[in-house]
Image (cartoon, rainbow, N blue to C red):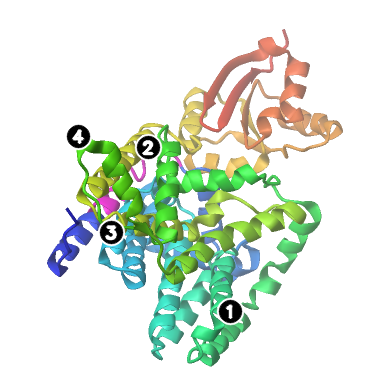
């Protein structure tokens, strides 16, 4: 039996249920985990004036400017900081539904909205005080306007497209890859959109001009990265597969979800439709044969657009990372992930038999639920709250705290309420410089708290202290997610 058509009333009801589910998953336990390093740095950057943010930020400044106003209204608690990203994430569910409905039909829109709503990848960045959730929202909105331009060429689409892309470029560098993927598709389809050519070219040109101020603002930082290297390692081909695995979900079942997603995306990409088949359990082989004869291929114009949207922001940074400076990191690819869900949703929409569609949908929801259970149950962010509490509750008046790497002092100080002397040391400090720095810091002190994170666990400082004071001088050693805290007794043996 074929799937029934969805009425407008049913669409509204289902969309509201999907939005309610997605909202709950993004708000639930919003402040349960500690802020990690990048989130604490968001507070630090947003605390500056708008001019200061633009001049000193290592990234396009839009998110930090918005966060500046948000903090002034709601404060700097974990919930207040992350709620801005949650709002962006919830809005993205509605937008991805709109893209799916506009590009294909309302069923595909609802399925893609559901996949986004229960995506642990989207939920994670909707619960983080960084700009990735905003990058996601603007990427979807940009493609929505782009699709509207291709389909209708109404005048007001172009200002909306321009403004969205302007905000996208000022949110994150990888937003430029999303814009470039649209230009690529338009060039490949140049002959089909003669009416839109001039207006589209002018809109893109004006967008490029208005993004040029990013060059002097961030040009020095980019040049420094190109010359000195970046913390991101050179990716292998497995990194692309890892990105798709992350898009699919989290937890032990994510590999199975990925396999299902890839199969459905393949069905969606080539518009494979089951046009007729009746399943008879007593004659399974005959039914399977009938199913095989009922597969056909259709036009892939819309699917090609999704394929370019998905692949371009992944492949180009990968090539850049292999031959120039490594910039490939999965969280930066969040603007490409909606295309993956839309392809999967298109494939599910082509499963027009109840006995096939509903089991696949239920299986995906169940596997996603297992991943979400793992996400909410286990701490995945650095536990700076717990580390700061340990030091604060067990410290004595004549203690000192040393951080390695030095920038880890930022998230620690967000939680720490004590008044001990603090010193930050670079994790790549030269061995000859360690003695002078440590001797000055521990002079006249009885105990030393050593806080290690972000590669500091294997830094020369740790081995220097153990060599100088001996392993027996360590009277406390606690591990938290992403953090080691060691307490040294500096008293002579």
Q: Can you identify the residue that label 3 sits on?
A: 275
- What residue range appears in magenta? 20-34
Choose mark 4 or mark 1, whichever is in front.
Answer: 4
Choose mark 4 or mark 3, whichever is in front.
Answer: 4
Residue 261 visible from this viewpoint:
yes
Count of marks placed on residues: 4
Q: Secondary structure at mark 3?
A: loop
Q: Secondary structure at mark 2?
A: helix
Q: Residue furthest top?
A: 493
Asked if 203 appears above or below 220 in the picture, the reply is below
In this view, the residue in front, 105 or 324, is 105
Residue shown at 86% from the left, 32% from the top: 432
Q: Residue furthest right?
A: 432
Q: Can you identify the residue that label 1 sits on?
A: 187
Asked if 244 appears above or below 349 in the picture, the reply is above
Real-space CA distance between mark 4 and mark 2, rounded to the nearest whole angstrom: 36 Å
Real-space CA distance between mark 3 and mark 1, rounded to the nearest whole angstrom: 34 Å
Give the left or right position of residue 152, taking residue 290 as reference: right
Q: Secondary structure at mark 4?
A: helix
How far from the left and from the top, in percent, is residue 117?
A: 32, 53
Real-space CA distance between mark 4 and mark 1, rounded to the nearest whole angstrom: 53 Å
Closer to the chain start, of discs 3 and 2, is 3
Asked if 412 appears above or below 162 in the picture, the reply is above
Real-space CA distance between mark 3 and mark 2, rounded to the nearest whole angstrom: 34 Å
Residue shown at 71% from the left, 62% from the top: 221
In this view, the residue in front, 128 or 108, is 108
- Residue 198 part of the magenta-drawn span: no
Closer to the chain start, of discs 3 and 1, is 1
């Amino acid at each position: 039996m074929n799937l029934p058509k969805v009425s407008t009333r049913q669409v509204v009801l289902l969309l509201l249920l999907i939005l309610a589910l997605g909202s709950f998953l993004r708000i639930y336990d919003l402040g349960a985990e500690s802020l990690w390093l990048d989130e604490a740095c968001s507070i630090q950057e947003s605390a500056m004036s708008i001019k200061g943010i633009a001049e000193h930020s290592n990234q396009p400044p839009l998110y930090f400017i918005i966060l500046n106003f948000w903090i002034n209204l709601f404060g700097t608690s974990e919930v207040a900081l992350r709620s801005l990203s949650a709002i962006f994430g919830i809005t993205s569910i509605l937008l991805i539904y709109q893209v799916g409905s506009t590009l294909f039909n309302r069923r595909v829109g609802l399925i893609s909205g559901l996949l986004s709503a229960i995506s642990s990848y989207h939920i994670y960045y909707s619960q983080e005080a960084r700009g990735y959730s905003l990058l996601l929202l603007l990427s979807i909105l940009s493609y929505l306007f782009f699709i509207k331009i291709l389909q209708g060429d109404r005048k007001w689409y172009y200002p909306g497209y321009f403004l969205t892309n302007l905000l996208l470029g000022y949110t994150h560098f990888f937003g430029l890859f999303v814009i470039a993927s649209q230009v690529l598709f338009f060039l490949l389809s140049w002959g089909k959109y003669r009416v839109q050519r001039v207006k589209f070219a002018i809109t893109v040109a004006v967008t490029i001009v208005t993004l040029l101020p990013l060059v002097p603002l961030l040009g020095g930082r980019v040049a420094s990265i190109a010359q000195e290297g970046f913390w991101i390692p050179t990716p292998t081909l497995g990194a692309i597969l890892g990105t798709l695995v992350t898009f699919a979900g989290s937890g032990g079942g994510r590999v199975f979800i990925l396999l299902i997603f890839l199969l459905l995306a393949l069905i969606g990409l080539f518009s494979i439709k089951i046009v007729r088949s009746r399943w008879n359990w007593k004659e399974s082989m005959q039914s399977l044969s009938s199913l095989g004869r009922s597969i056909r291929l259709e036009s892939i114009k819309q699917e090609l657009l999704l394929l370019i949207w998905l692949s371009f922001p992944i492949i180009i940074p990968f090539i850049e990372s292999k031959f120039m400076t490594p910039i490939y990191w999965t969280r930066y690819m969040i603007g490409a992930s909606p295309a993956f869900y839309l392809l999967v949703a298109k494939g599910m929409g082509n499963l027009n038999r109840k006995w096939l569609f509903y089991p696949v949908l239920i299986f995906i929801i169940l596997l996603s639920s297992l991943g979400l259970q793992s996400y909410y149950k286990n701490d995945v962010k650095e536990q700076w709250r717990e580390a700061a509490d340990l030091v604060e509750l067990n410290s004595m008046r004549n203690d000192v705290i040393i951080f390695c790497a030095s920038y880890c002092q930022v998230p620690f100080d967000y939680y720490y309420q004590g008044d001990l002397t603090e010193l930050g040391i670079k994790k790549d400090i030269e061995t000859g410089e360690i003695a002078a720095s440590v001797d000055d810091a521990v002079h006249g002190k009885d105990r030393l708290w050593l806080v290690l994170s972000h590669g500091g666990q294997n830094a020369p400082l740790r081995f220097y202290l153990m060599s100088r004071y001996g392993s027996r001088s360590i009277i406390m050693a606690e591990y938290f997610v992403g953090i080691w805290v060691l307490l040294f007794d500096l008293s002579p043996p």
